[in-house]
Image (cartoon, rainbow, N blue to C red):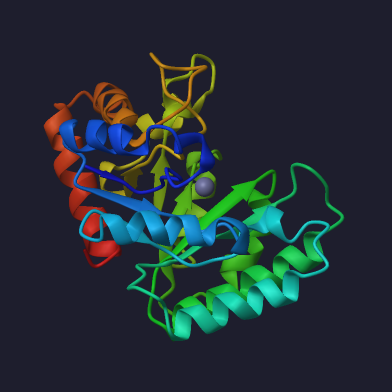
Amino acid sequence: MIDTHSHMYAEEFDTDRDEALQRAWDAGIETLILPDIDSESRDRMFDMARREPQRCRPMLGLHPTSVNDNPRWQEELDMVERLLAAPPMPVCGVGEIGLDLYWSREFYGIQREVFHAQVELALKHDMPVVIHTRSAYDEMLDAVNTYKGRGLRGIFHAYAADVDMARKLCRAGDFFFGIGGVVTFKNSGLDAVVRDMPLELLLLETDSPYLTPVPHRGKRNESAYVVHVCRKVADLHGVDEAVVDRLTTATARQLFAL
Ligand SMILES: [Zn+2]
C-alpha cells in the first residue's frame, strides 16, 4: 500500500517519528509520498526522506496558502524552480500546489499565478502534479482546462467535490483522486461519491497529521492509518481490501514512476 500524501516530516512527529514510521512499515505501507509546503518546512522533509530514501519520496512545490499574506511569494516560487532544476535528492512530483479560497478570496490572483507557473514546471520536468483544492473547484476546473491536450497528469488530493466535477476534471488531463480519512466520516457525503467512482481513478492517502480516519478520529493522523481508508473504500465498492490495495498501489507506482 502507498500513502500518496503524508506530512510525517511535520513537527507533530518530532518526539516519535521513528516509531510512527515503523508502524507504517509494519502495516504494510511500502512508500510515503511527501508533499512539499514551502521553505519553512522543506529541510525537514528532505531530512526525513534522506533517512529513508527507498520508502519516502519527496516532492517540490509551493502550497497555495503559503502565498497568502506572504510578500516573499515570488522568492518562494523562484526557489521551487531552482530546486526542481537541481534537486538535493530525486523528487517524484510537483506539489502540493493549487487553489485554496477557504480562508479568503483576496489572494486568488496570486494563487492562480503561482499555480500556473508550477504546472508549467511540472510539464517541463515531465512530472505529475499533486493539487490541493479547497472551496475552489470551479476555479480549479477553469485553471486545468487551459492544459487540455498537453499531457498534464496528477492527483486531486483530498478530493471533496462530486462525480460530475471529477468527470470534467478528467477531460483536462490524466487525473486521479486522492481519498483520505474524510471518507470514513459520518455525513461527509464523500462515501457516496467514492462509491460511484471507478477504483482505477482512486489513490489512498492520509494527509497526516490531519484528517484522521475513524476509528482514530480526533487524534493525530499517521501513515499507518491509511489501511482504514483502504478498508472503507473496499466496503463501498463491495470488494476485498486486497483488490483496492493492488489497484491503488499500481496506479501510484505508475504515476510517480516508483
Ligand atoms: Zn497536504
Q: Position of residue 114 (x, y in %)?
A: 68, 71
Residue at 52%, 17% (x, y): give it: 218
Depth check, front residue: 50 or 165: 50
Drawn side of residue 128 relative to residue 233, left or right: right
Depth check, front residue: 15 or 254: 15
Determine if residue 208 is in view. no
Q: Position of residue 253 (x, y in %)?
A: 22, 58
Answer above or below: position of 142 versus 21: below
Drawn side of residue 152 relative to residue 140, left or right: left
Residue 86 quadrant: bottom left
Answer above or below: position of 2 versus 217: below
Drawn side of residue 236 relative to residue 104, left or right: left
Q: Position of residue 214 (x, y in %)?
A: 41, 17
Determine if residue 91 is in view. yes
Residue 37 quadrant: bottom right
Residue at 50%, 42% (x, y): give it: 159
Residue at 50%, 44% (x, y): give it: 10
Answer above or below: position of 168 versus 114: above
